[in-house]
């Protein structure tokens, strides 16, 4: 570490809730340098990830009358009671869409009604700071999906943008390097796999230093189409495929399949029109035999369900879209196959937020 500072004080600071080190950066130039030192940030993140009490979930709601958006967060340990809710200082009050988060940094899509334009922002809720990201060469449209991840090789964050086309045609991707602000296209998948990402407001799953999404061989309208779990490493930018369970590959009929992150593992989930939701988790990364069925839910009112967090007792927190077009937070347990609604909030998008000091 290039900056000399009392190690005992460093250790104490690294164990404090993030709001306190953020305030301490104003003590002096030395303290500010310490707070934003890469070694300190990684040490603070390490402690935060191992502290269950520091984990939070965030969600937003938008007024149907004014269109004004508000964002809130609360401890994950208390989310089923929705208490200790804290309103966040969001950088925009117009219509927003939360895409993804990594280490406390959040990507949001903002509609600027005054200038009649769309902007993408990188936001640090803990520090109350945000920056406007460069416009992508391929604008965000319906079917766009973003992923945010940390590259330990370069010590930088990268944002990957993919698109999915309704007819299943191949659409190129784009990657943005945060520090340099450089933006460039990435090559198409060498085996001709089409991107079948979830769409506006969804996130690419980032696990094991790689982005993940669902791909497809064949035409979307063909019965013979086959789904695949695609990975794209953040450091060397190489495509790979992760074997899916035969039970997943054998699914027939009209259904929707996607992938997310649950408890640090890849989680594949399928939604059928008759509202049967199945969830599988990959316990050992890259090992086909380690796929395990986690949860099956039958609920005629739920149109879409995405798992967000698994508690120590096995309960799974997930966001759902119900037929009345209202976002809802649910808790599900593997033993009862039922979804228990915990709160109704218009236009909810809860997401996992690990608190980390990161200068934007």
Image (cartoon, rainbow, N blue to C red):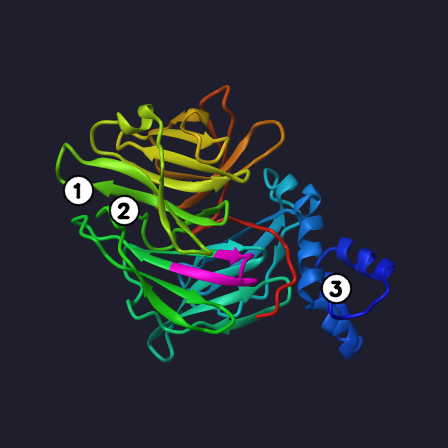
For the point 26% across and 37% down, which residue is it? 227
Q: Are marks 1 and 3 in contact (CB under 8 Å)?
A: no
Q: Secondary structure under badge 2?
A: loop
- Left or right of residue 184, residue 83 in this image: right
* Location of residue 154 in the rendering, given as x and y in whole percent from the top left corner: 53, 63
| Quarter of the image with the N terminus in it | bottom right
> Would you say residue 153 sits in the magenta stretch?
yes
Please give the count of numbered marks on the rendered protein. Answer: 3
Q: Who's the residue at 46% across and 38% down the image?
A: 266
Residue 133, given in percent of the width and then of the height, sits at: 44, 72
Label 2 vs label 3: CA separation? 41 Å
- The Cα atoms of the two marked residues, 1 and 3, are separated by 50 Å
Q: Could you say where residue 360 lies in the image, as x and y percent from the top left? A: 57, 70
Residue 285 x/y as whole percent:
48, 35
What numbered label is drawn on residue 21? 3
Please tell me which residue is depicted at 41% across the width and 25% down the height of the picture.
Answer: 296
Mark yes or no: residue 323 visible. no
**What SS does tag 1 mark?**
loop
Q: Secondary structure at mark 3?
A: helix
- Among numbered discs 1 and 3, the one appearing first in the sequence: 3
Asked if labels 1 and 2 touch by Cβ distance under 8 angstroms, the answer is yes
Q: Which residues are magenta?
A: 149-160
Q: What label does residue 220 carry, if any?
A: 1
Q: Is residue 121 left or right of residue 51?
A: left
Residues 248 and 69: in front is 248
């Amino acid at each position: 570490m290039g900056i000399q500072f009392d190690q005992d004080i460093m250790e104490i600071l690294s164990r404090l809730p993030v709001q306190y080190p953020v305030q301490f950066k104003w003590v002096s130039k030395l303290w500010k340098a310490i707070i934003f030192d890469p070694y300190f940030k990684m040490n603070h993140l390490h402690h935060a990830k191992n502290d269950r009490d520091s984990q939070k979930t965030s969600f937003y709601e938008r007024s149907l009358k004014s269109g004004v958006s508000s964002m809130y967060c609360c401890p994950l340990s208390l989310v089923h009671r929705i208490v200790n809710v804290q309103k966040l200082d969001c950088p925009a009050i117009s219509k927003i869409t939360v895409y993804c988060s990594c280490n406390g940094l959040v990507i949001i899509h903002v509609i600027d009604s005054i200038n009649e334009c769309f902007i993408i922002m990188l936001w640090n809720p803990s520090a109350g700071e945000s920056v406007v990201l460069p416009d992508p060469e391929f604008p965000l449209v319906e079917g766009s999906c973003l992923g945010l991840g940390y590259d330990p090789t370069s010590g930088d964050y990268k944002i990957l943008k993919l698109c999915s086309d309704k007819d299943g045609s191949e659409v190129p991707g784009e990657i943005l390097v945060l520090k340099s602000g450089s933006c460039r296209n990435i090559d198409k998948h060498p085996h001709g796999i089409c991107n079948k990402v979830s769409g506006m407001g969804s996130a690419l799953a980032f696990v094991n230093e790689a982005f993940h999404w669902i791909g497809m061989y064949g035409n979307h309208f063909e019965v013979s189409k086959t789904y695949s779990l695609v990975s794209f490493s953040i450091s060397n930018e190489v495509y790979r495929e992760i074997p899916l369970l035969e039970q997943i590959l054998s699914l027939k009929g009209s259904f929707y399949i996607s992938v997310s992150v649950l408890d640090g593992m890849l989680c594949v989930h399928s939604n059928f029109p008759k509202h049967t939701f199945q969830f599988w988790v990959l316990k050992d990364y890259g090992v086909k035999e380690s796929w395990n069925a986690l949860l099956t839910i039958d609920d005629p009112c739920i149109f879409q369900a995405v798992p967000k967090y698994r508690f120590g007792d096995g309960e799974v927190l997930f966001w759902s879209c119900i037929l009345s077009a209202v976002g809802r937070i649910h808790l599900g347990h593997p033993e009862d196959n039922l979804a228990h609604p915990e709160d109704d909030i218009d236009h909810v998008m809860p997401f996992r937020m690990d608190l980390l000091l990161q200068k934007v």
